[in-house]
Amino acid sequence: MKTHIVCGSHRANSQGMKVAKYVAAQIEKKGGQASITDLHHNTLPLWDEGMWNDDPKWAPIWGPIEAKLKEADSLIFVTPEYDGMSPAAMKNFFLFIAGGEDTVAHKPALIIAVSASRGGSYPVFELRGSSYKNAKQVYIPEHVLVQEAQKILNDGPSSGPADDYIRKRIDYTLDLLAEYEKCLKPLRASGKINYKDYPNGM
Ligand SMILES: Cc1cc2nc3c(=O)[nH]c(=O)nc-3n(C[C@H](O)[C@H](O)[C@H](O)COP(=O)(O)O)c2cc1C
């Protein structure tokens, strides 16, 4: 299992990154490999048309992230809920991968939403509804809501039943993601995907 995790939090030391690191460690424990892109602090500036014209300014910024996406068999998008939305950094990220046929297209993707309170559903709905048309990642039906994030997935033992539950749920979801990896690999190799005539979704 080779998974690239993208964390859409805008804040340094975010709960999103705490979750991303926890998930990465779990993947490694299962014998997989995980890497993380932390989008906070303008890691990826706002997309501009230079991306269409091979403007050399983008190569050192986008190149290393793109390489990680290309290597990955699966993706995890960790999105906080900001004002009932997935944050701008997360949405900006999808502008870069749209059209990148061998980055995330037809690879399984898991959404993990992070909320300080009982939220998280809105960003899940938003990513499921609007981020995949041209990038073509395949969101698996399971997602994870990390609610009251400050209280759970902290270093050390579980803090109680809510923490136990989410740890088990993440474990289960990562196992499923690994199975989707196996299922979708032959699909990508099938020769049935036609990027030349149909680069973008309808
Ligand atoms: C600008 C902003 C808006 C937020 N709006 C919401 C919200 O609508 N719903 C919610 O559950 N949490 C909201 N939060 C709290 C986040 O859920 C909280 O910061 C959580 O730790 C995830 O964000 P983080 O990864 O940046 O830490 C907001 C946080 C920020 C910074």
Image: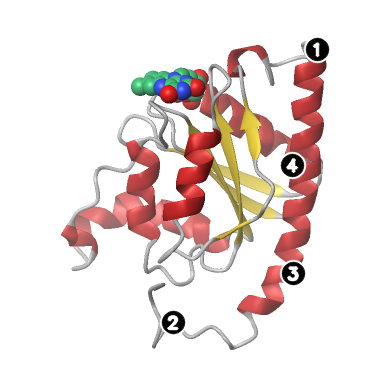
| Residue 83 in the image: above or below residue 177 | above
Marks 4 and 1 close (CB-CB < 8 Å): no
Instruction: Mark yes or no: residue 142 visible.
Output: yes
Q: How crowded is mark 3: few (under 14 residues within 10 Å), some or many (20 or more)?
A: few
**Snapshot quadrant of residue 167:** top right
**What is the three-letter code of the residue carrying label 3?**
Cys
Disc 2: which residue: 195
| Residue 163 in the image: above or below residue 197 | above
User: Which numbered disc, 3 or 2, marks the residue that appears first in the sequence?
Assistant: 3
Distance of label 1 from label 3 (alpha carbons): 35 Å
Q: Which of 45 and 133 is in front in this view?
A: 133
Looking at the picture, how far across and down is residue 113, in whole percent? 56, 34
Disc 4: which residue: 28
User: Which numbered disc, 4 or 1, marks the residue that appears first in the sequence?
Assistant: 4
Q: Nearer the viewer, residue 41 or 152?
A: 152
Disc 1: which residue: 160
Disc 3: which residue: 183
Instruction: Mark yes or no: residue 12 visible.
Output: no
> SS for tag 2?
loop
Looking at the picture, how far across and down is residue 156, in whole percent? 76, 14
